Amino acid sequence: MGLVLLLLAAPLLQVLLVNRSPWGGPDLVTLAVVWLALARGPVWGCVAGLVAGLAADVTPPADGTVGRAALVLSVTGLLAGHWRERRPLLVAGAAAALGTVLQAAAAVALGDEPWRSAVAGLPLVLAWTVPLGAVVGAVLVRRRPPAEVQRRV
Amino acid sequence: MKRAFVLLVLATAVLLVVIDRTLAPLAPLREAGATVYGTAESAFGTVTRSFGGEGRLRALERENAALRADLLSSGARAASGPAGGPAGGSASGPASGTTAVPARHRGVAAHVVGFGRGPQVTIDAGSSSGVVRDVTVLNADGLVGKVTWTGAATASVSLITDAGSSVGARMTESGELGVVTGVPGEGRLRLSLFDPNAPLKVGDVVETLGSAGARPYVAGVPIGTVASIEDVPGAATRTALVRPAARLSALDLVTVIVPPPGR
């Protein structure tokens, strides 16, 4: 339940707090999708990606293509949920990195941003997002014994 | 069953992108997002501003005093006015804060409430206050950017550091003309003067040249100061890096120059 609330509030927190910090910050929307996928499975992850991505696409001042983050994050959520059983730490980190990089790639591919400006901010965002995603994601997977996870899905 | 559901979700996402790119921009969806999340941003801004009101009041008083002094000391320029306005081109009363406002344009005060990943910000004034697309946004120090999208009560502003931004510029002292563009990834701007032999030194002030009809940019707003000169022998233009006059990473109170209604 807490994760679902975080998912809906993530675009807002990103715009209000994270983006104005002078030291950079994580991509909260990607993190929320990856965490939910790891805790609840691929179907939840896919839906969470669509909802949170769409919210991030229409939260001002975003002015890119509507559905760009929704598409990228629903794929990310699906993959993160699919592979969560083995090596949770690795999968969580890889999914966080995948979501962040794919969003930048989609922005360039759809012509919303020149690649130079899309690439410029990427290393700092990755440095925040990947460790945070990996550690919390692994904790979320471990908190649920596998048997119970299978019953819930 | 589960597989069909996942495919449906993915197809929805693809469909959204395709519709927005090719058929029609999904304006209602964006409008709804601005209503929900934009209103929340404005509310958060109002709440945080209500704390620490005393310090804020003092800062605004100082800014007000500085603007008054500016207005008095540059009275001659205000009286002559930029080109394009009708006769008697004085600024439209005390509401418009800068000397550069063309006749019958007015300034709308707004706060920056949200920051995007790139060089975009949200302000808490929208079409209900008369804000429209492609108009100048500035603050007490200098040019900030232009409005790219307006919702009912919020608007998105693209900063001058955006890679796609290019502003017609003039050197305040020498009067040389050029273009200022954004440099991605750092808070600097690149100035290209059309005359490769133009005199240029560190510390020179760059101001806006002004667009036709004062949209998107009004004339005479400081853009920044020259920080370093790039010496490329044989280049067709003279280029330099410019430090923005406005602190673009810590924006708060800004003014939107709004054209008169009915145009």
Image: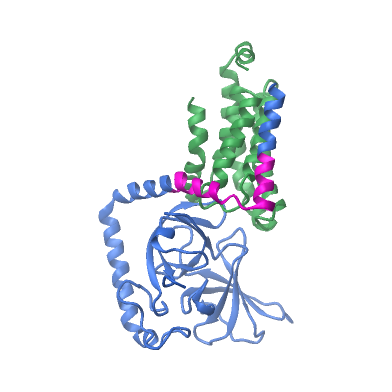
Question: Which is nearer the eye, B60 or A56?
Answer: A56
Residue B182 lies left or right of residue B137; in this view the side is right
Answer above or below: position of A105 versus B68.
Answer: above
**Residue at figure coordinates x 38%, y 65% from the top left:** B108
Question: Which is nearer the eye, A43 or A35?
Answer: A43
Residue B35 lies, in percent from the top left, at 45, 47
User: What is the letter of the blue chain?
Assistant: B
Colour seen for chain A: green
Q: Is residue B35 magenta?
A: yes
Main secondary structure of the magenta stretch: helix
The count of marks equals 0
The region drawn magenta spans B13-38
Residue B239 lies, in percent from the top left, at 64, 76
Residue A50 lies, in percent from the top left, at 61, 36
Answer above or below: position of A92 versus A110.
Answer: above
Residue B102 lies left or right of residue B2; in this view the side is left
Question: Which is nearer the eye, A36 or B40?
Answer: B40
**Residue at figure coordinates x 65%, y 55% from the top left:** A112
Answer above or below: position of A103 versus B188.
Answer: above
Is there any visible trace of residue B43 in the rendered image? yes
